[in-house]
């Protein structure tokens, strides 16, 4: 049996899982989404992801017709129906079906889609070898134009960044904000280790998505005795960093070994990164909302 997709309270096989071309999620990217991992039969940080989903929806005045608890149950049920133990969940809430104008008030009510499937963002061997990345010329949109903390369906800027990476023959690109501070990747957050062995990551106010993986990695790093700082840094700090890695639900924690052709540290994943990867995976396997009875 193929995958079963949740659409507005019912389940459909993948081939029949369709939404209207008049949905404003399709016409205008008007909606919000979340990406969530399932590790070892447990949905990782489900509450945190749903809270971010509802906060994004609140900002754009999008009414989600399910309570957070109902959404939680619908998400668990989607994973259960698909009998998955290690998976990636995508929740999409769109503005719903409207006319060809922009007006969200004319839309019939939000549509909810939940997909549970496998995902592999980067080839497995790159988690050992590390990624080569570039800094993109595309800049992050500022918070007073379109707040990057909203996880909206409007990912064009991120896609432009990903295209720049492909054109440079690398798999990921980093983005700077209008002031030249490093903010994040196309779909992940960034960390560097400086010459003093401190772990640095850009603060939320610079214009990033407040990553859930980012927050957990900071927590784990502090437990490991590292000094963790949320501070602005520039391209130069990237180039002279001793270690660098990216975090995200889909990306997990992946080392970066070269940035704009400057090697990072020894040009291979560093000890701090490898330890955090190990600790993160251990934590992720044992925490989370149980999908199946044990
Ligand atoms: N930044 C952007 C732009 C993203 O799309 C993502 C993926 N959701 C992240 C960062 C990482 O966030 P998280 O760890 O919550 O997946």
Image (cartoon, rainbow, N blue to C red):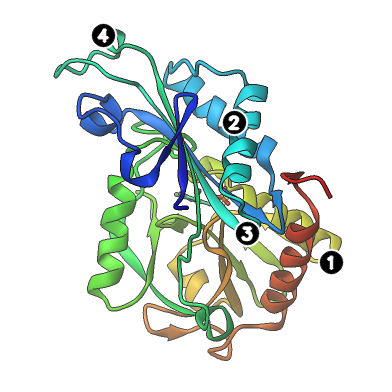
Q: Earlier in the sequence, mark 3 or mark 1?
A: 3
Residue under the point 75% across and 47% down: 288
As drawn, 123 above or below 95: below
Q: Earlier in the sequence, mark 1 or mark 4?
A: 4
Q: Which residue is mark 2?
A: 74
Q: Earlier in the sequence, mark 2 or mark 4?
A: 2
- Residue 224, labelled with which disc? 1
Q: Earlier in the sequence, mark 2 or mark 1?
A: 2
Res. 51 visible in picture: no
As drawn, 148 above or below 59: below
**SS type, badge 3:** loop
Task: Tell me which corner region of the image, top left, top right, bottom left or bottom right, holds residue 109.
Answer: top left
As drawn, 197 above or below 204: below
Residue under the point 74% across and 73% down: 278
Confirm or deny contact between disc 1 and disc 4 (CB under 8 A). no
Position in image of residue 105 (x %, y %): 30, 8
Q: Which residue is mark 3?
A: 86
Position in image of residue 71 (x %, y %): 60, 27
């Amino acid at each position: 049996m193929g995958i079963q997709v949740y659409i507005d309270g019912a389940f459909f096989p993948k081939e029949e899982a369709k939404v209207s071309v008049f949905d404003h999620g399709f016409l205008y990217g008007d909606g919000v989404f979340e990406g969530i991992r399932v590790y070892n039969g447990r949905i990782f940080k489900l509450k945190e992801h749903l809270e971010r989903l509802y906060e994004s929806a609140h900002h754009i005045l999008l009414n989600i017709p399910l309570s957070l608890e109902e959404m939680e149950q619908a998400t668990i049920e989607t994973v259960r129906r698909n009998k998955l133990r290690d998976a990636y969940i995508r929740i999409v809430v769109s503005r719903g079906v409207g006319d060809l104008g922009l007006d969200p008030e004319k839309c019939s009510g939000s549509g909810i889609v939940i997909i549970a499937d496998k995902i592999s963002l980067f080839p497995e061997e790159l988690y050992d070898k590390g990624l080569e990345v570039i800094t993109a010329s595309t800049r992050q949109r500022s918070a007073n134009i379109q707040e990057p903390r909203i996880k909206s369906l409007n990912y064009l800027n991120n896609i432009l960044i990903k295209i720049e990476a492909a054109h440079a023959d690398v798999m990921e690109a980093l983005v700077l904000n209008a002031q030249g501070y490093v903010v994040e990747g196309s779909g992940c957050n960034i960390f560097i280790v400086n010459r003093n062995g401190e772990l640095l990551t850009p603060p939320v106010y610079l214009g990033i998505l407040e990553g859930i993986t980012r927050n957990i990695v900071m927590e784990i790093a502090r437990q490991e005795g590292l000094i963790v700082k949320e501070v602005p840094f520039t391209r130069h700090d990237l180039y002279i960093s001793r270690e660098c890695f990216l975090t995200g639900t889909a990306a997990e924690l992946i080392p970066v070994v070269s940035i704009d052709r400057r090697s990072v540290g020894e040009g291979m994943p560093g000890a701090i990164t490898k330890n955090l990867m190990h600790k993160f995976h251990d934590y992720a396997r044992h925490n989370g909302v149980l999908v199946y009875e044990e």
